[in-house]
Image (cartoon, rainbow, N blue to C red):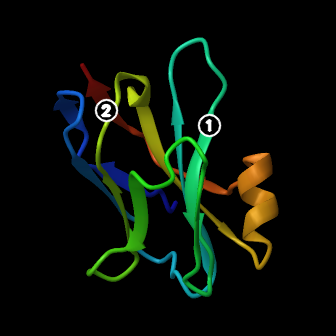
């Protein structure tokens, strides 16, 4: 059973930075669309951004200019660099993957096949 594993969460002051990583062995970025999502209790899950199989990234308006998605240096890994963090960025962050050439549709609909357990980010 393949499951992405997120790491790098923690607590940070507003204006600070964190870098999240997602290890997804066997889920090659050349085949799988990879995305980051976040959720806080009582709220709907929100898409943060994704990287398609061609390596093109898209970020949600709420994080554009502050967050950057990239493929990690290690094989089958995904990173999320978060700068200028705000209290409203506080959430559980999830990494997800789906085998598709229609990454945008899957990101908008939230339909991904593989989900990590999440890593908590708290901004105060």
- The image quadrant where one finds the C terminus is top left
Q: Residue at x 63, y 32 (%)?
A: 45
Q: Which residue is mark 1?
A: 46
Within the image, what quadrant is residue 70 found in?
Answer: bottom left
Q: Residue at x 60, y 11 (%)?
A: 42
Disc tally is: 2
81 or 25, nearer to the observer: 81
Q: Which tag, 1 or 2, sits closer to the chain's start? A: 1
Within the image, what quadrant is residue 88 found in?
Answer: top left
Q: Residue at x 80, y 72 (%)?
A: 102
Residue 119 image point, x, y percent: 34, 38
Classify 10 Å Cα crowding around label 1: few (below 14), some (14-19), many (20 and above): some
Q: Is residue 104 left or right of residue 118?
A: right
40 or 25, nearer to the observer: 40
Q: Give me the disc on residue 88.
A: none
Q: Is residue 9 left or right of residue 109?
A: left
Residue 69 image point, x, y percent: 43, 64
**Observer able to see residue 111:** no
Q: Residue furthest top?
A: 42
Residue 55 image point, x, y percent: 55, 83
Q: Residue at x 75, y 64 (%)?
A: 104
Q: Which residue is mark 2?
A: 121
Q: Is residue 43 left or right of residue 111?
A: left
- Dot 2: what SS? strand
Q: Is residue 51 left or right of residue 119?
A: right
Q: Is residue 96 above or below residue 55?
A: above
- Dot 1: what SS? strand
Q: CA distance from mark 1 to mark 2?
A: 14 Å
**Observer able to see residue 49:** yes
Residue 57 image point, x, y percent: 56, 71
């Amino acid at each position: 059973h393949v499951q992405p594993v997120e790491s790098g969460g923690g607590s940070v002051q507003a204006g600070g930075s964190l870098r999240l990583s997602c290890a997804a062995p066997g889920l090659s970025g050349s085949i799988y669309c990879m995305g980051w999502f976040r959720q806080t209790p009582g709220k709907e899950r929100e898409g943060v951004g994704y990287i398609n199989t061609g390596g093109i990234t898209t970020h949600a308006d709420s994080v554009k200019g502050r967050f950057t998605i990239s493929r990690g240096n290690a094989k089958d890994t995904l990173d999320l660099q978060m700068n200028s963090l705000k209290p409203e960025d506080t959430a559980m962050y999830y990494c997800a993957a789906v085998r598709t050439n229609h990454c945008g549709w899957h990101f908008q609909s939230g339909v991904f096949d593989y989900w990590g357990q999440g890593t908590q980010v708290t901004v105060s």
